[in-house]
Image (tube, grey):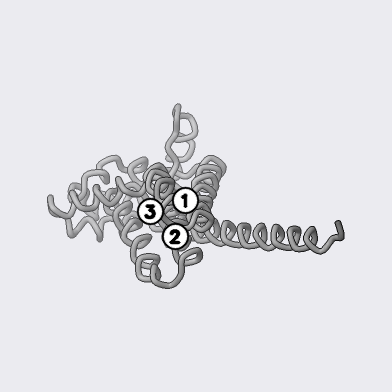
Amino acid sequence: MFEIGPILWLQGFESPALTLVMRAISNLGSTLVYITFLLPLSFWLRLKPTLGVLLGVLLAAAATEGLKSAIALPRPDGVCAELQQPGRVSREAAAVLDPQGFWGLPAPAAPPAMQQAAGADYGFPSGHTGAATAFALGLVLFFGRRFLAFAVGWPIVMALSRMYLGRHFLADVLGGFAVGGSAALVAWLGLHWFVRGLEATQGGSAAKPC
């Protein structure tokens, strides 16, 4: 799943218009964008659910950054820098950089080189995909099924944009799906338990004699 082949397949559809769209999608996927969107929105929508979605996004961001540092696997453009320019790398040229087999890891020399570099930018799991998944699934969990189509489509589109731009392997975006989904569920369960505990405490206090 750390093969360059799926990235090259996506880049086979390269055109200036598609690249522009993919870059625009990718630019919308940072955690800061979701925070900027959700904080003002909390004043117009129900506060607790909106903050619950925000909590899921923040948990996803923290988890992905922690996992990236702990696992320390390179991005595709750390293995082949030209992958950042869709359409420039041939399948034959990239084949020598692919791992052995579907379950293989990136080129063996890449992780040590990344670890020695100052400010290393690791790839697994994808932070953009994790944040998109946490945001979209959080909308479904906290606001209902009317956001279901968005919850399915937005993380997939984000994952495709990150692969097309040579920033993530297939394994990276799959890891982002898992981290983002888990973060949204933890935020939903945590807020649910907190509200239930608060209601139980208030109920118990009301039952006490004066």
Name the secondary structure under disc 2.
Answer: helix
Placement of 179 over or under 115, stated as above or below:
below
Reading the chain from its start, which is encountered first: label 2 or label 3? 3
Mark 1 crowd level (few <14, some 14–19, many ≥20, 10 Å Cα): many
Q: Percent position (x, y) of residue 52?
A: 53, 55
Q: Which residue has dot 3 on it?
A: 169
User: Of the numbered discs in the image, which one, if any, rests on residue 166?
Assistant: none
Disc 2 to disc 1, C-alpha distance: 8 Å
Q: Residue furthest bottom?
A: 145
Q: Who is closer to the viewer here, 100 or 81?
A: 81
Q: Between residues 123 and 148, which one lies in front from this camera angle?
A: 148
**Which residue is the extreme one toward the front?**
210
Label 1 sits on residue: 125
Q: Earlier in the sequence, mark 2 or mark 1?
A: 1
Q: Give the tally of numbered discs.
A: 3
Looking at the picture, which amino acid does disc 2 mark?
Answer: Leu
Identify residue for label 2.
174
Q: Secondary structure at mark 3?
A: loop
Question: Closer to the camera: disc 2 or disc 3?
Answer: 2
- Foreground: disc 1 or disc 3: 1
Observer able to see residue 106: no
Relative to 206, residue 126 above or below: above
Q: Residue at x 27, y 49 (%)?
A: 165
Q: Residues within 10 Å of mark 2 (few under 14, many from 20)?
A: some
Which badge, 1 or 3, is on the more N-terminal residue? 1
- The reply to whether residue 137 is visible in this rendering is yes
Secondary structure of the residue carrying numbered label 1:
loop
- The image shows residue 110 at horizontal and vertical percentages of 43, 40
For the residues bearing labels 2 and 1, Cβ distance under 8 angstroms: yes
Question: Residue at coordinates 51% horizontally, 42% vertically from top-left?
Answer: 65
The amino acid type found where label 1 is placed reads: Pro
